[in-house]
Structure formats: structure tokens, C-alpha cells
Image (cartoon, rainbow, N blue to C red):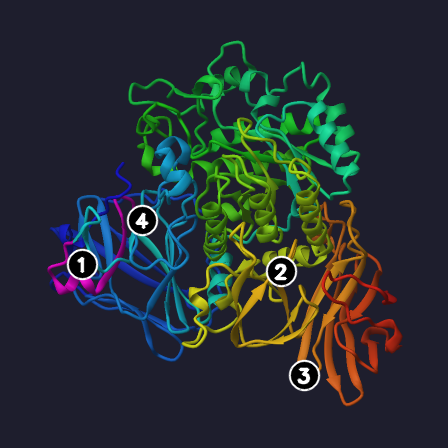
């Protein structure tokens, strides 16, 4: 497959209405049945049925039961399609007579391009944050195997590991999302010009400068158009459509330590002792392929793991979760139980010769489960259940599931027992693997929230797994790319994601390592991972000064775990993004073009990071959206609606908290990972100029099981406002399903009077001025008022 070539509208025949019919089109002699249906809340599904596309092969799990209410308007006429916002403005429209075209099995939709358009989303892409003037394909690749080394180290490989064919079209502050539910190599072009070898402009037709398009080389057309009106509204609707991320276990939000080369109980024991010695909080200890017997999935190397259940249990009894790797490839070894079982069940992918398809990956001669088959997914789930149930494991990571096949031609890997060509399921392979793994984990531990991390994925991966952005590199380019890649993934329905820190390949130096941690310490997923051919890069590997920086920011992450955990709870409830661009929460304006800012980001509605991404840099320009902001680095309030120059010293990084934010935090300075969600500090960032009400919902549960779905959760709604006497903090809508919560209240303003009111039991408590401290640089608390909130 050529990644740098794309279907062009000039090679398509566009549909025309058939004579005597208002409901059918014709293109190239083919009868087409288009349909546009409003699913509710401004979500529209456009489909085209024809004999050339008899089956929808997508296995994405889409939830289409939206409320029966209007938002914007999509209209399909005999020759055009248009999408309008609530105020009647056209956001997206096809040129009359060029709405839908066909070329053999391929299909394409062409739209008018306007200069004020901006494009975002598109899943996992390394080609920038704003995506105008791009041609791109959606095809899961094994990047290090499929691209030249210089491309993945110093360039922008495209496509990458994970495919979500979703485009956000922005016009002014109006938004439309376009999701192509198609498992083939979908293409999108936002480039109004056609270039020849990137050296000359081939545009000799004005039409080429006013169009953009989407399409697929095959597969039944099914496209969802989602009307915002805001970016936040749009993202919540998309997330509900493709599937929210289930609330993960609390440990999965902590720091994770991994390395290709960790293989034994002795390795994990050593890591545990080092984290304790250096008082650095860490939750997960991960195993790469070396823990297995000859890289055979579902095995433990007896030399390193003579008693897996007992040894894993010992590590986990210390508060660390053991996370082993699973690759999909099964070694073709007649003495190997998984191969024997899979052969008997006949669940391996076939080749055109009718025999099992063979690739060459870590185990050597390898066959692959066919996850397109219910029988294949069931077989894999049983293997997972048996392996994890016996060892007591509740977290796994899935690698090589692009699928990577080594030197074997992957187009010869067929699905549905050889009946379906490779491209019908290639992009969905990892989704099927995650889905089957999830089922196996629930079977092994029915009440434990499973945690799965995947390298590859497709639409709906969010239902089952978090994603890491694959094998990156330890350099400043990859550090800078990590922010726009994470943000576009979040906008595309994969909110639980993050990169390898401080890069999988290459040897990071001390400054680069510190810069990575300062930049991404609040990313939704945070894992230190490296290649065994590179230098060791555990937090203590770079000397005391660098370790102090890493420890400082890991402790701050653990300080904020109650806040992060509640962001994930909100994601499950409503589809809210976690890490998100500035224009998710604030409107972009001509004065402050927030939609162009790709090196700052919000973490939930309260926190904004603006890291210095140059490892040798000590200053940067920061965009402060319209609000007041508490400058955590300097310890004071600053006005927003402008750009400011910021200089850092030592271990500092620019971090801001939005005025009117109520942020739950862990008590004290965390030196371990023992986070108690029922014992917190509640930080009220309310400036003297704040007007209106500050709202926050806090949820506390056991952080591990599904008990919260059975009512075992405490929920408190905090509302803060001002009256003429000072600050009034109300506690409302309380539910103590998990018991009382002990709260220390901290206010970031010098107030003479603060009153706490718990409306459920009509209790009021005066919080005396001496209980508050105006804290500065390091968010350290000197005094606080402690109250236990209970029925």
C-alpha cells in the first residue's frame, strides 16, 4: 500500500438522481439508495446501499439512541448534502452534483472548502494539531517496521498504529464532526491544492482549490455527521456514539514503570525496593515479552517465574500491580498448549492457499487468532481467563496487534476462515483482540475493573482499552509531537492515552528526561517505557538532580489523583474529554487564536499546562484564555485574555488553575501510592474578583471494583459563591453510599469570613480566617480546616 498516494475526485463518477425517482441515485450505471437519518441531538447517519457493497463489515460498537431533540440541521437533496449549525449557518456542504462519487469499489464524498475552515481530530496522527492541507490514510501500521528509521525518528510517519477516521470541521466557533464507520483504508484530504512530488503545484483548475473530500477504497458507505454546537458538545456526542471509557481502577492513573527487558520476579522486586528507597510513588510494574517461555503467549518462563501466582501476589501485596504483555501471535509449535488448542478450534487466520497464515514475529514461525470470528474471540478470552485467573493479574498490555506480521505480506492474512480479504479486518484486528481480552479478564475476576493498554485500535476501542502512542523516540521532536497527538486522540474518542516517557528508542539525557516529565506528568496515561538496547531510564537513573525533578512532578500527579479520578468518572458519565485543547473550554478569537495553540492544554476544566518543550529552554510565551488564573509556579492571581512571557527556574513548569475551580487533592505530600479517596483536601481557587458560582461534583469509592455501579459510592456536590460577608460553600445532593468523607478546606484568597453549609442536614460551620492559608509556589498547605462530611 502506498501511504503517500490518495484517491482523487477526478477519477470518480458522481451520482445523479435517477429519472422518475426521488429516493435513488445513479452513478456509472449503478443504482444507489442514499439515506440520511436524524438519530437525535444533532447526530445524523448517512448511508448508501448498492449491490457492490452488500455487507457492512465494521465491528465498531456504536450507540445510536440519542434523545429526540434537534441541534443544527443536516439536509440531503437530490444532488447535495449540507450541515447547518443551530443559528442556520452552513458549516459543511457539498458542491451540487458532487456529493457522492464512485470508482469501482471505491466511494468518495466531496465538500466545498472555505478559507476560514480548520480541521482537527483524525485519531493518532503525527502530522500536526490543526490538519489543514493534509492528505492522510487510516491504516494501522507497525511504524518501526514499515517506515525508514529516519522517518520515525526525525519525521512524521503517517499512518501510525491506531486508526479513527474522524474529522472535526471548525468554522468560526461552529463545529461539525464527520465519522466514517468503515474498516478499510479510509482517506481524508483537507488540501485544496494538488502537489507533484512536493515540488510543484499541479492545480490548474479552480475547483481543486475549493474542495476537500473523504472516502474509502471499499466497504459500505456509512458516515455520521455530528453538529456541535461547541467543541465540548461535539466531543461528548462522539464519545457517547463510539463508547465512553469505563472508569478505570485508581492504580491505572498512577505512574507506571516498564522496560523491554523486565522479565522476572527479581526485576520487579528490585524496582519496588528502589521506588520505596527514593520515596517516589508508582503503581504499576510491567513485564515485556521476556517473561514468557520463548515468547509464547499465555506462558511464564519457569526460570524467572517458578510460582507465578505466589510471586505476583507478593509484588501486588506491596501495593504494586503487575502488568504482563500479550502479543496476538501464537508460536506454531505442536507441543505448545495454545497452538494445540487453537488448531483444534480452527480459529487461526487463513491464507489464499487455505492453510493457516504464517508470519514471523518474536516467537518465530507464528500463526494469528482470527478475531473477526466469535469463536476466535471466545477462544482468546478463555486463554486470557485461565492465564490471568491463575496468576491473579488484573491489568495487561497488548502489543504487535496492528497486526505486525514481520516480513510476511499481511494482505495474505485472510479472515472469516479465509472468506474475507485482509483489508476488511486489518484496522479492526486490535479492537477484536481488546474486546476478547476484556471478556477474559471479566471472566477471571468478575468484580475487578479490568485495565487494558493497547498499541493499535479502531472506532470503539475506548470501550475496552487505553492506548499508548506506540514506539516513539527520545528527542525533543517527539516530546513536542506528544501534545497535539494526545489532544487529537482525545477529540477522536480515545481520551485515555499517552506516550512512552521519556521515549522508547534512543538515549535521553538528563535535561530531556526532566522536560518530558514536566510536560506530561498530568497526561491521562503516564508510563516510563524504554527499549532494552537503550540506557536505563528509571527515575533514579539520571542522577540526584534529575530524580528530584521527576519525584516532584510524580508527587504532584499523585497529589491531584482525586481530581484526575473524578475526570475519568465524568468521562464515563457524559463523555467529557480529560486532556483537551484550550478552545474546548474557551472560544477562540481573532485576538487569541486558541485553535492554533498546540503546546498548551487543559486537564479537565480547572488546570492548564504550558510546558517549556525545549530541554535547554527557560522561557516561553503563554496564552492565557479569558478568565483569572492562579499561577501555581509563582503563587498569585493573574488576569487572562492575553499572552504573557514566562521564565522558569530550576525544576519549575508553568501551571495555572482557573478562577472558580474547586479541585480535590490528596492530603499532604504523597510519597507513596496509598491514595484514600475518602480523605482529601478541597482546594477552592476563588479570587477576590470572582462572580457567580463555582461547582464541582466529588465522587469517592473503592477505586478497584464495580461496587460503585451497585450504589457503593459517596457523591458530594460543592457550590461556592460570594455574598457581602465573604465566601459561602454549600454541600448539596449528597449520597453517602461509600461512607463519610474527611475534607480539609483550603482557599486561595484572603477572606475574613467563610461559611460551610451542608444542606442535607442543615448544618452550618464557620471556617475561621486562621484556618486558611494563601499558599504559593508548590501548592503546599500550611493550615487547613478539617471537616468530616457524613449523613
Q: Secondary structure at mark 1?
A: strand
Front residue of 502/57: it is 502
Q: Quadrant of the C terminus?
A: bottom right
Q: Residue at x 36, y 57 (%)?
A: 131
**Secondary structure under badge 3?**
loop
Q: Verify whether residue 340 appears in magenta.
A: no
Q: Nearer the viewer, residue 362 or 359?
A: 362
Disc 4 element: strand
Badge 3 crowding class, 10 Å Cα cut-off, few under 14, some 14 to 19, many 20 or more, is few
Label 2 with label 1: CB-CB less than 8 Å: no
Distance, label 1 to label 4, CA atoms, is 28 Å
Task: Give the residues in magenta.
Answer: 201-219
Query: Which label is found at residue 25?
Result: 1
Where does label 4 land, which residue? Answer: 136
Distance Cα–Cα, label 2 vs label 4: 32 Å
Which residue is denoted by mark 3 in the rendering?
Answer: 689
Which callout, 3 or 4, points to the residue nearer the camera?
A: 3
Q: Is residue 203 magenta?
A: yes
Nearer-N-terminus badge (3/4): 4
Which numbered mark, 2 or 4, is in the foreground of this view? Answer: 4
In space, the residues marked 3 and 4 are separated at their CA atoms by 47 Å
Tell me the number on the disc at residue 467: none
Quadrant for the N terminus, please. Answer: top left
The answer to which of 697 and 270 lies nearer the viewer is 270
Please indicate whether residue 272 sits to the left or right of residue 584 in the image. right
Count of numbered circles in the view:
4
**Picture quadrant where residue 513 is located:** top right
Real-space Cα separation, disc 3 to disc 1, in angstroms: 61 Å
Please name the residue that numbered disc 2 is placed on: 570
Residue 408 on image: x %, y % = 34, 23
Amino acid at each position: 500500500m502506498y501511504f503517500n498516494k490518495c484517491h482523487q475526485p477526478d477519477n470518480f463518477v458522481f451520482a445523479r438522481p435517477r429519472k422518475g425517482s426521488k429516493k435513488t441515485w445513479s452513478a456509472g450505471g449503478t443504482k444507489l439508495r442514499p439515506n440520511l437519518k436524524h438519530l437525535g441531538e444533532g447526530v445524523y447517519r448517512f448511508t448508501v446501499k448498492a449491490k457492490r457493497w452488500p455487507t457492512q463489515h465494521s465491528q465498531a460498537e456504536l450507540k445510536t439512541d440519542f434523545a429526540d431533540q434537534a441541534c443544527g440541521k443536516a439536509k440531503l437533496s437530490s444532488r447535495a448534502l449540507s450541515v447547518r449549525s443551530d443559528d442556520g449557518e452552513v458549516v459543511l456542504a457539498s458542491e451540487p452534483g458532487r456529493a457522492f462519487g464512485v470508482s469501482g469499489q471505491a466511494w468518495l464524498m466531496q465538500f466545498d472548502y472555505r478559507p476560514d475552515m480548520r480541521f482537527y481530530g483524525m485519531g493518532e496522527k503525527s502530522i500536526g494539531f490543526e490538519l489543514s492541507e493534509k492528505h492522510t490514510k487510516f491504516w494501522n501500521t507497525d511504524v518501526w517496521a514499515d517506515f525508514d528509521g529516519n522517518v520515525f525518528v526525525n519525521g512524521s510517519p503517517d499512518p501510525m498504529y491506531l486508526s479513527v477516521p474522524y474529522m472535526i470541521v471548525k468554522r468560526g466557533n461552529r463545529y461539525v464532526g464527520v465519522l466514517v464507520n468503515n474498516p478499510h483504508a479510509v482517506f481524508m484530504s483537507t488540501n485544496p491544492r494538488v502537489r507533484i512530488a512536493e515540488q510543484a503545484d499541479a492545480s490548474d483548475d479552480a475547483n481543486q482549490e475549493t474542495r476537500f473530500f473523504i472516502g474509502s477504497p471499499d466497504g459500505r458507505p456509512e458516515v455520521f455527521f455530528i453538529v456541535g454546537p461547541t467543541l465540548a458538545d461535539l466531543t461528548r456526542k462522539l464519545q457517547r456514539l463510539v463508547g465512553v471509557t469505563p472508569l478505570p481502577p485508581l492504580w491505572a492513573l498512577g505512574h507506571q514503570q516498564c522496560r523491554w527487558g523486565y522479565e522476572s520476579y527479581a526485576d520487579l522486586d528490585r524496582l519496588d525496593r528502589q521506588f520505596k528507597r527514593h520515596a517516589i510513588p508508582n503503581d504499576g510494574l510491567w513485564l515485556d515479552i521476556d517473561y514468557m517461555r520463548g515468547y509464547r503467549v499465555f506462558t511464564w518462563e519457569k526460570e524467572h517465574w517458578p510460582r507465578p501466582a505466589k510471586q505476583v501476589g507478593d509484588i501486588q501485596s506491596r501495593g504494586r500491580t503487575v502488568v504482563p504483555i500479550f502479543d496476538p501471535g501464537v508460536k506454531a509449535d505442536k507441543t505448545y498448549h495454545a497452538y494445540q488448542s487453537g488448531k483444534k478450534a480452527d480459529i487461526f487466520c487463513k491464507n489464499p492457499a487455505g492453510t493457516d497464515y504464517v508470519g514471523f514475529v518474536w516467537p518465530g514461525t507464528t500463526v494469528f487468532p482470527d478475531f473477526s470470528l466469535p469463536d476466535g474471540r471466545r477462544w482468546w478470552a478463555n486463554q486470557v481467563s485461565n492465564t490471568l485467573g491463575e496468576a491473579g493479574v488484573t491489568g495487561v498490555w497488548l502489543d504487535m496487534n496492528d497486526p505486525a506480521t514481520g516480513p510476511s505480506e499481511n494482505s495474505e492474512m485472510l479472515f472469516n476462515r479465509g472468506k474475507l480479504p485482509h483489508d476488511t479486518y486489518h484496522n479492526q484486528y486490535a479492537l477484536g483482540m481488546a474486546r476478547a481480552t476484556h471478556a477474559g479478564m471479566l471472566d477471571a475476576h468478575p468484580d475487578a475493573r479490568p485495565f487494558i493498554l493497547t498499541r493499535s485500535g479502531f472506532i470503539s476501542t475506548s470501550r475496552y482499552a487505553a492506548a499508548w502512542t506506540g514506539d516513539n523516540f527520545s528527542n525533543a521532536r517527539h516530546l513536542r509531537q506528544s501534545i497535539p497527538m494526545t489532544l487529537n486522540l482525545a477529540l477522536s474518542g480515545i481520551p485515555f492515552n499517552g506516550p512512552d516517557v521519556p521515549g522508547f528508542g534512543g538515549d535521553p539525557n538528563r535535561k530531556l528526561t526532566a522536560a518530558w516529565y514536566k510536560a506530561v506528568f498530568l497526561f491521562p496515561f503516564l508510563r516510563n517505557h524504554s527499549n532494552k538496547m537503550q540506557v536505563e531510564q528509571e527515575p533514579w537513573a539520571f542522577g540526584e538532580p534529575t530524580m528530584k525533578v521527576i519525584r516532584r512532578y510524580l508527587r504532584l500527579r499523585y497529589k491531584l489523583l482525586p481530581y484526575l479520578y473524578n475526570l475519568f468518572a465524568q468521562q464515563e458519565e457524559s463523555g467529557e474529554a480529560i486532556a483537551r485543547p484550550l478552545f474546548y473550554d474557551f472560544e477562540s478569537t481573532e485576538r487569541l487564536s486558541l485553535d492554533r495553540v498546540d503546546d498548551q492544554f487543559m486537564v479537565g476544566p480547572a488546570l492548564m499546562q504550558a510546558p517549556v518543550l525545549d530541554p535547554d529552554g527557560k522561557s516561553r510565551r503563554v496564552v492565557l484564555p479569558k478568565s483569572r488564573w492562579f499561577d501555581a509556579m509563582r503563587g498569585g492571581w493573574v488576569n487572562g485574555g492575553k499572552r504573557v512571557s514566562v521564565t522558569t527556574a530550576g525544576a519549575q513548569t508553568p501551571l495555572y488553575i482557573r478562577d472558580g475551580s474547586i479541585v480535590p487533592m490528596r492530603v499532604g505530600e504523597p510519597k507513596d501510592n496509598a491514595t484514600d479517596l475518602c480523605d482529601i483536601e478541597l482546594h477552592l481557587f476563588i479570587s477576590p474578583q470572582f462572580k457567580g458560582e463555582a461547582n464541582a461534583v466529588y465522587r469517592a469509592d473503592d477505586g478497584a471494583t464495580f461496587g460503585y455501579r451497585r450504589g457503593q459510592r459517596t457523591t458530594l456536590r460543592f457550590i461556592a459563591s460570594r455574598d457581602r460577608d465573604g465566601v459561602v460553600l454549600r454541600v448539596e445532593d449528597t449520597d453517602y453510599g461509600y461512607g463519610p468523607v474527611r475534607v480539609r478546606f483550603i482557599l486561595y484568597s484572603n477572606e475574613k469570613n467563610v461559611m460551610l453549609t451542608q444542606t442535607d442536614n442543615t448544618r452550618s460551620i464557620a471556617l475561621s480566617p486562621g484556618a486558611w492559608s494563601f499558599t504559593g509556589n508548590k501548592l503546599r498547605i500550611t493550615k487547613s480546616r478539617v471537616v468530616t462530611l457524613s449523613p
